[in-house]
Amino acid sequence: MSTNKIIPLKVETRPAVVPLAAGESKCDAGRYHVYSIDDARRLFGGRKIYLWGAGQKGRGFWQALNRCGFTVESFIDSSPEMLTKSFMGVGTISPDNFFALPDVRDNAFVLTASVDIKNKVMFEELQRHGFERGVSFENIQTLSPFYPTIEVTGLCNLRCSSCIRSDKSLIEDGNYMSYEDYEKVITKMVGEIPFVYLVDLYVFGEPMLNKDLPRMIRLNNRLGLASGMSTNLYSIKHLKAVLDEFPAQIRVSLSGASEATYDVTHTGGKWSKLEKHLQTLAELVSERGHRTIVEVYYHLYQHNQHEIGVIKDLCARYGFRFHPSLAVLFSDFALQYSRDGTLPDSAKVANELTLIAMDRLLQDCRDHADLNCILTRIVPVINWDLSVMPCCNYTYSKIAPNYLDVPLAELIRERTHSSVCANCQSHALHRWNNQGFYSDFVARIVAENTQPALDEAAAD
């Protein structure tokens, strides 16, 4: 792939609808087993527990283990940044130092806590040192296979072109989940998923607008749950109170680093204001000992590639993680386009600026339609009004009116056979926004737009 926008493929090159066998689903979370505390005790076999991955997932699972009565000996991480930090009194050692520990293969049980690609590398390294999966190491997803998501705010303060909230006529603003409702939701969730370790507090809304967000994070911490959120950071009224509760991770969504670029796709925002908010965030996180991980999620478009270096430098200066991603439109728009080739006017700005054309993205989905949904584990998805949505990718359809009234197993069955899932899969959109598939392309874009590459080009 080149850095230029790919020429669209004709939709007619492949059938738009992907046939599914009767009763078949590519999004069946019912195949996963939720571990009990006794299951985990048998798995660990009395060995010392180590968590490989000191980021959001690792910190979250430390809390889940602690809640269930297990002690973690240490984190393992290769990041120089993580090696200098501890979390809740638990230190971090490098993989080399871990493997050098005496009798480590016989006395340690390692739980890997990262994304799938990195987990596979960890598995290979553990096996190379004589560890055996299911005996001396396992992935945390085996114990807690699901990633619950709760929409604590049913509205947003920006109108990003790629988002379903780009036009109020497409989706009505909702309201805020109250702390009292949240407490009921999270209590039920912990009872049904003993080793749940991370709850994301957003779907399509802006979580920072909810005045009860700090209390929700405090409750999560008390129950041993890591709190994750994605924010445009355009409102920081409650930011100090939020950081006082030490959420595990805050992801800041960006799509530009100047007045000329930021507002193009983060519609309604101004870079000068956001830049000040980023500085405030950095100062507040630093004052609190960097206990909250900040990740800048930089959506790559045609108009903002040249500012990658600016964002990377900003992240290095503030101690943030830089996470570039391929910008794509929300699934609702992709489904509409797959059906009839049209898009709402509000989505056309982002669509014209994507690095890979919509037709090519849809073709990539169809080419991998036989694979399972990339969001199978994202369950349950709970709206601000306690209704349950089948997916975090489609706006506000319901599989249950009230999460509190329906057992998790029943919600999973309803989701598996919902019309939303069937419709999505018939257009192969269960593979939509598979960022891992485009990781090499994104890495190349970043390399071509950062200082060493620019210096070489200037020298030529």
Image (tube, helix red, strand yellow):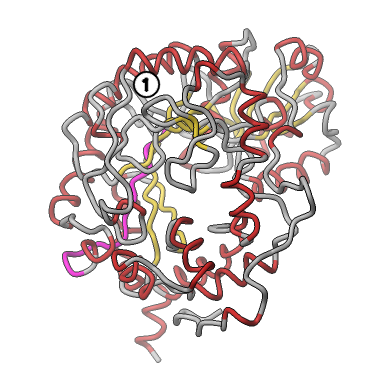
Q: Would residue 435 be visible to someone looking at this image?
A: no
* Residue for point 58% across, 25% down: 61
Residue 1 location, quadrant: bottom right
Residue 33 location, quadrant: top right
Between 226 and 178, the one nearer to me in the picture:
178
* Residue for point 23% across, 59% down: 267
Residue 277 location, quadrant: top left
- The answer to whether residue 136 is left or right of residue 286 is right
Question: Residue 87, position in %: x, y?
Answer: 47, 23
Task: Give the residue type at disc 1.
Answer: Ile
Near mark 1 (Cα within 10 A), the count class, few <14, some 14-19 or many ≥20, is many
Q: Would residue 167 be visible to someone looking at this image?
A: yes
Q: Is residue 147 above or below residue 116?
A: above
Question: Residue 228, position in %: x, y?
Answer: 43, 33
What is the number of callouts on the image?
1
What residue range appears in magenta? 249-260
Q: Residue furthest top?
A: 69
- The answer to whether residue 230 is left or right of residue 272 is right
Question: Residue 294, position in %: x, y?
Answer: 37, 40
Q: Is residue 227 magenta?
A: no
| Local SS, label 1 | helix
Between 166 and 1, the one nearer to me in the picture:
166
Q: Is residue 257 magenta?
A: yes
Which residue has dot 1 on it? Answer: 217
